[in-house]
Image: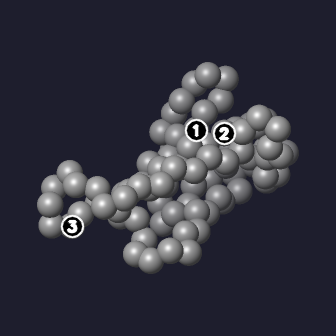
Amino acid sequence: MEGSEPIEISPVESVTFIMEYEPKPNKIHVLQISSNEKSEVKVSNNNFSAPTQKGIYYYSYGAWWMDEKKENISNGDANYTLAIEVK
């Protein structure tokens, strides 16, 4: 993400993941990465709240299309990164 401009947002602003693809993934995982620390982010209805403290935060968003008939079988996955700056 070096050299990328972060998305500017307000503290506690809602961040929404929109995927214009069908079918939608049925498993997601989001990590917040800052100062070499990683923490899981709780996502509800494809939304999470931005941090309260000002600063730049990096996120890793993983999506999986898990087979609904066979346990632990993925039919595909995608990984995205983004940076936000809480102003």
* Mark number, residue 13: none
Q: Name the residue under label 2.
A: 58
Which residue is found at the position 77% from the left and 35% from the top?
Answer: 2
N-term mark: 1 or 2: 1
Q: Is residue 5 left or right of residue 59?
A: right
Name the image quarter holding the C terminus: top right
Q: Is residue 67 above or below residue 57?
A: below
Find numbered disc 3 in the image and state the secondary structure of the residue it sits on.
loop
Q: Foreground residue, 23 or 35?
A: 23
Would you say 41 lies left or right of 1 here? Answer: left
Give me the disc on residue 32: 1
Q: Name the residue under label 3.
A: 68
CA gap, disc 1 to disc 3? Answer: 28 Å
- Marks 2/3 in contact by CB < 8 Å: the verdict is no
Density class for disc 3 (Cα within 10 Å; few <14, some 14-19, many ≥20) is few
User: Is 56 displayed left or right of 42 in the figure?
Assistant: right
Q: Kindly indicate whether the residue at mark 2 contacts the one at mark 1 (C-beta within 8 angstroms).
A: yes
Amino acid on which disc 3 is placed: Glu
Foreground label between 2 and 3:
3
Res 21 seen here: yes
Residue 38 in the image: state x and y as whole percent.
54, 30
